[in-house]
C-alpha cells in the first residue's frame, strides 16, 4: 500500500506538484510519506533515518551547484557558502516556501513548540530530499527546484558572506588562514528555558579567545560569539596581511 | 586535451581498471587527473575543489549503503558508523588498497611528509570519488567498488563500535542521549613538531570534562581524549539507566 489514506495521497501529490515535478515523476511515495512524519506522530516509523541520509543529499546538491556555478572560488569560499546554504535557518526558510508544516504529521502539542519549529522544518526538508534522492538514486527530482533557492541565496551570501551565518563565515576564514576550525566552549549559566542569557559561548582560535556571546539556545550564543570573533579576526588579518 | 601526457593516460586507465570499472566507463578523465594532483604539484589546478565535493559524495555513498543494509538501526547508530567509515584513517586505508599514492602527483619533498600522509591519501580518495560522481551525476561508478570496503568495515565496526574511532563513537553516544555533540578544547603545549605530547585535548559534554588526552597532532590528542570520555560516559549511562 503506497498511501495510508486517500487524503494523504492527495496531500502528497499536491506537494510534489508544488515542487514543480511532473505528475509522472517516479516518486517512492511510501518514503515521501515517512519523510513527512514527525517522531511525535510515530515513534517507530518517522523521518529520522531519512534525515540522516538527507543531510548528505543536501550537502552534495549544494556542493555540486557551487562547484559548477563558481569556478573561480576556492574550496574555503565554497565551504563557507555551503555552511550557510545548508543551515537550519535557510532550510527551514525553503520549507516555508512550500508550506511544509502543513504536510508534516505531528502530535497535537508539537505545533505549539515554536522554538523547535526551525529544526523541525529543516529536518523535514532534509528527509524529503532523501526520499526524492532514493526514488531514482540521482538528484534529478531535487536539482530542478532546489537549485532555484540555492542560486538565489548563494548570490545574496556572496554579496555579504557574514549576512546569514557568522559561524560558517568564521569557519571559512580559519580554514583558509590557519587550516583549522574554531573551537566553541559552551557554558549553561542559567536554568530557565527561554532565558535570553541562558547559554554563554566562547570562540577559540589559535589559543586565543576571539569572541563571547550569550543566547537563549546554544546555537544563538554561538552565532553571537562567532559574529564577534569573525569581525575581530578579519580585522586582525587585514592588519597583518601587508607584512606577510 | 583529456590527458597531459601519454604516460598519465596509461596511469589513470590502469587505476580505473584496478577499481574494477569497465574500460568503456564514461569517466571524465580531466577531472580524474585533477583529483590526483596534490596542491604542491600545482597551486592553481589541484584536488582541493574536488575534495570539497567528494566529502559530500563519500558521506552520501556511506549513508545510502548504511540505510539499505541496516534497516533496524536508528539514525544515532547509523551516524556513529558513518563517522568511522568516512574518517581519514579509514579512507586512507582504502586509498592504500589501490596504491593511490603512486598515482598522486606531488612535489618532491611531499612524499617525505609521513605525518601528512593519511590526510593526503584521504583527500585524494575524496577527490577521486567526486571526479567519478561528476562523470555521470550518479554513484554508479562509485558503489560497485566502494561498497565492498564499506561492507567489510561496517561489519567490523558493528562488532565493536569503539574499535576504530572513539570520536565517532562518542558523538553517537552524546547525540543519542543528549541530542548534542561533545566539545573539544585543544591546547598546544609544546612547539616541537612530532613531539608526542605537543597537543592536549579536553572533551566536554554537558558542562563536564570527561576526558583529557595528549598527542603529536590535534587529531591524535582528540582521539585519546575521546576514548577516555567514551568509556567514562558509557559507564555513567549504564549506571544511571535503571533509574531512568
Image: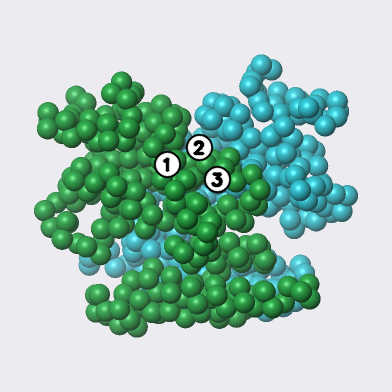
Chain colours: A green, B cyan
Q: Residue at x 62, y 77 (%)?
A: A235
| In the rendered image, the vertical position of residue A150 relative to residue A29, given as above or below | below
Chain designation of label 3: A
Q: Residue at x 24, y 75 (%)?
A: A193
Asked if the residues shown at circle 3 and circle 1 are in contact, with their CB atoms under 8 angstroms apart, the answer is no
2 and 3 marks on the same chain = no
Q: Quadrant of residue B192?
A: bottom right
Q: In the depicted view, which residue is nearer to us: B90 or B13? A: B13
Q: In the depicted view, which residue is nearer to us: A128 or A16? A: A16
Q: Residue at x 80, y 47 (%)?
A: B42
Q: Is residue B53 visible?
A: no
Q: Position of residue B142 (x, y in %)?
A: 57, 30
- On residue A66, the disc is 3
Question: Dot 2 corresponds to which residue?
Answer: B61
Chain designation of label 2: B
3 and 1 marks on the same chain = yes
Q: Residue at x 76, y 27 (%)?
A: B2
Amino acid at each position: 500500500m503506497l498511501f495510508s489514506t486517500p487524503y494523504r495521497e492527495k496531500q502528497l501529490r499536491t506537494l510534489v506538484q508544488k515542487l514543480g515535478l511532473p505528475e509522472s515523476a517516479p516518486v517512492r511515495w511510501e518514503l515521501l510519506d515517512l519523510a513527512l512524519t514527525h517522531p511525535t506522530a510515530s515513534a517507530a516509523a518517522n523521518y529520522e533515518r531519512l534525515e540522516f541520509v538527507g543531510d548528505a543529499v543536501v550537502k552534495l546538491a549544494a556542493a555540486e551547484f557551487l562547484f559548477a556555478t563558481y569556478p573561480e572560488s576556492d574550496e574555503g569560499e565554497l565551504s563557507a557558502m555551503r555552511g550557510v546554504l545548508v543551515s537550519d535557518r535557510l532550510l527551514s526558510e525553503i520549507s516555508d516556501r512550500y508550506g511544509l508544516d502543513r504536510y508534516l504529521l505531528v502530535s497535537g502539542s508539537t505545533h505549539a513548540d515554536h522554538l523547535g519549529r526551525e529544526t523541525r522544518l529543516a529536518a523535514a526538508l532534509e528527509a524529503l530530499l532523501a526520499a526524492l534522492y532514493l526514488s531514482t538514486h540521482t538528484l534529478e527530482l531535487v536539482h530542478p527546484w532546489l537549485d532555484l533557492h540555492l542560486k538565489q541565496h548563494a548570490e545574496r551570501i556572496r554579496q555579504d558572506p557574514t549576512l546569514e551565518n557568522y559561524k560558517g563565515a568564521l569557519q571559512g576564514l580559519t580554514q583558509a588562514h590557519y587550516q583549522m576550525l574554531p573551537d566553541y566552549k559552551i557554558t549553561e549559566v542559567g536554568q530557565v528555558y527561554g532565558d535570553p542569557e541562558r547559554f554563554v559561548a566562547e570562540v577559540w582560535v589559535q589559543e586565543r579567545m576571539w569572541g563571547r556571546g550569550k543566547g537563549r539556545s546554544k546555537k544563538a550564543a554561538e552565532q553571537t560569539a562567532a559574529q564577534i570573533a569573525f569581525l575581530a579576526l578579519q580585522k586582525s588579518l587585514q592588519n597583518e596581511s601587508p607584512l606577510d
